[in-house]
């Protein structure tokens, strides 16, 4: 790839042993945005989702040398600073950065989510005097903006005044006061840049994961600046990435759970992958038409594959065949293309099954016949029967309730490959074959049909 050089972003920040904030969050964010990340570690924190237990600062000259080493070898396109615990580190970092002219995002990290202080009082002053004037953008949250400017922030107007002060009084090129801690159904950030204000809004996410939010936001802005994006565009992307990172947060630990900056990248990649897998599985099914036709149900066949957790939330996160696969006088035909949200019943079934067996992301259905169960068992598959006559009235009435009932009544007891029922009044008897992906589920189904046909 002659002539191509990957964009490089530098984070000058502390390490969070819990992997949720600090340089660990920054590197994931850089990766999510397609930027190579390099680091200058300022401090090693002993930390998890519950709190910060110890802090060990790196000597300032080692911090400076890390910066020099990466800048002089690879070149840095943009940088961010995070935790800079002492005024000595702030002063050394500021002096080192003054020698270079790449864009710089200053995240004035003061405390962890748990309340632990990560910056001494004299370091706050050093930050304002030495680093803020070098900043392309300063990214305080409400509390940090209050401590930096002395303004009590209770309204958007207060946030605007604080942002403007950081630019006009303290010399940053731009400042954004993040509104995640102000009340309301929206999280509103106020940017002051080139003499004007701009607001960035996102819905407030209830029950999301917020440990590392600030780190991820400032890293995302730095990554976008490293790619040559303009400041306002970079902030827009950062706001979207962080909102997703909170919504699809990593459910680990007993305290404040970490954001998931990779959600941004992974959701897109998985949407492609599940559609492709169902397309391949469909081609495989159609190639096995001879085996399938005798068992084609009246209601048609579908193949469903869901995004993995935590991304699979609704039927729109499950790929299927639009219009199903039906028996026609000319053989099996797909009603339409493969798409997300194209299946309803099987999508609900697989979403419900994943609560018990998250790796079983796919299912395909076929009409029940006793020899299929016999063949499946002889191949060593785990098979369970459900009696639809036993289904409680409540789940029958609820939208998708039957599928949830099937999943719960079987998978809460044990994990199986196949679930069948012998039907009920007006309900066609059905076999449902599960797999780790659509191709695996269809192969499993075809192996059963093949075995049944040889008897
Ligand atoms: C290392 C580190 N940097 C920043 C924060 C702020 O979330 C944290 N908790 N830990």
Image: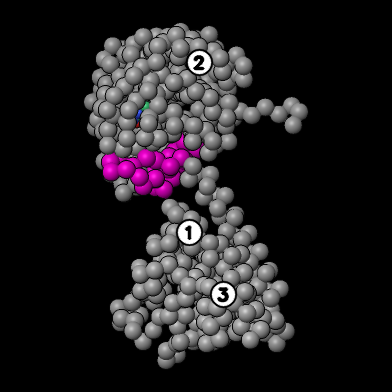
Element type at mark 1 = loop
Is residue 381 something one can see in this rendering? yes
Question: Which residue: 44% across, 32% down?
Answer: 24
**In this view, the mark in front (3 or 1):** 3
Question: Which residue: 60% across, 54% down?
Answer: 272
Asked if 292 appears above or below 314 in the picture, the reply is: below
Does mark 2's beta carbon lie closer than 8 Å to ligand 1? no
Q: Which residues are magenta?
A: 235-261
Res 66 label:
2
Mark 1, residue position: 359
Within 10 Å of the Cα at label 3, are there few (<14), some (14-19), or many (20+) other Cα atoms? few
Instruction: Tell me whether circle 2 and circle 3 mark residues in contact (CB < 8 Å).
Output: no
Is residue 176 something one can see in this rendering? no
Report which quarter residue 327 is drawn in: bottom right
Taking the image as shown, residue 404 lies to the left or right of residue 449, namely left
Mark 3, residue position: 379
Question: Which residue: 53% across, 65% down?
Answer: 435
Q: Quadrant of ligand 1?
A: top left
Residue 111 position in % (x across, y down): 29, 26
Earlier-in-chain disc, 2 versus 3: 2
Report which quarter residue 409 is drawn in: bottom left
């Amino acid at each position: 790839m002659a002539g191509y050089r990957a964009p490089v972003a530098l984070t000058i920040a502390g390490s969070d042993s819990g992997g949720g904030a600090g340089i660990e969050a920054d590197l994931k964010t850089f990766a999510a945005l397609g930027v190579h990340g390099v680091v200058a570690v300022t401090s090693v924190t002993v930390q998890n989702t519950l709190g910060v237990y110890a802090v060990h600062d790196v000597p300032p000259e080692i911090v400076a040398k890390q910066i020099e080493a990466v800048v002089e070898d690879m070149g840095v396109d943009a940088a961010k600073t995070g935790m800079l615990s002492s005024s000595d580190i702030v002063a050394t970092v500021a002096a080192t950065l003054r020698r270079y002219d790449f864009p710089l995002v200053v995240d004035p990290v003061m405390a962890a989510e748990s309340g632990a202080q990560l910056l001494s009082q004299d370091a706050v002053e050093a930050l304002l005097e030495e680093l803020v004037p070098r900043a392309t953008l300063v990214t305080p949250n409400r509390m940090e903006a209050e401590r930096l400017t002395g303004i009590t922030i209770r309204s958007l107007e207060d946030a605007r005044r604080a942002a403007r002060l950081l630019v006009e009084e303290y010399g940053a090129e731009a400042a954004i006061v993040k509104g995640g801690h102000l009340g309301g159904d929206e999280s509103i950030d106020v940017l002051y840049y080139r003499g004007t204000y701009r607001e960035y809004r996102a819905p407030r996410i209830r029950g999301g994961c917020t440990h590392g939010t600030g780190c991820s936001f400032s890293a995302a802005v730095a990554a976008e600046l490293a790619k040559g994006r303009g400041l306002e565009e970079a902030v827009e992307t950062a706001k979207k990435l962080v909102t997703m990172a909170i919504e699809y947060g990593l459910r680990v630990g007993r305290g404040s759970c970490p954001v998931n900056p990779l959600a941004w990248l992974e959701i897109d990649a998985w949407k492609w992958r599940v559609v492709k897998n169902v397309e391949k599985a469909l081609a495989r099914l159609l190639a096995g038409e001879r085996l399938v036709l005798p068992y084609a149900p009246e209601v048609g066949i579908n193949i469903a594959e869901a995004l993995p957790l935590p991304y699979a939330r609704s039927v729109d996160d499950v790929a299927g065949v639009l219009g199903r696969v039906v028996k026609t006088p000319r053989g099996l035909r797909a009603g339409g293309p493969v798409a997300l949200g194209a299946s309803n019943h099987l999508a609900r079934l697989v979403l419900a099954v994943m609560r018990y067996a998250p790796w079983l992301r796919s299912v395909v259905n076929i009409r029940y016949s006793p020899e299929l169960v016999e063949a499946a068992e002889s191949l060593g598959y785990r098979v369970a029967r459900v009696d639809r006559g036993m289904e409680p009235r409540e789940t029958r009435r609820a939208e998708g309730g039957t599928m949830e009932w099937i999943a719960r009544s079987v998978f809460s007891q044990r994990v199986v490959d196949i679930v069948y029922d012998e039907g009920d009044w007006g309900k066609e008897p059905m076999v449902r074959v599960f797999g780790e992906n659509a191709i695996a589920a269809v192969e499993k189904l075809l192996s059963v049909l093949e075995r049944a046909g040889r008897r």
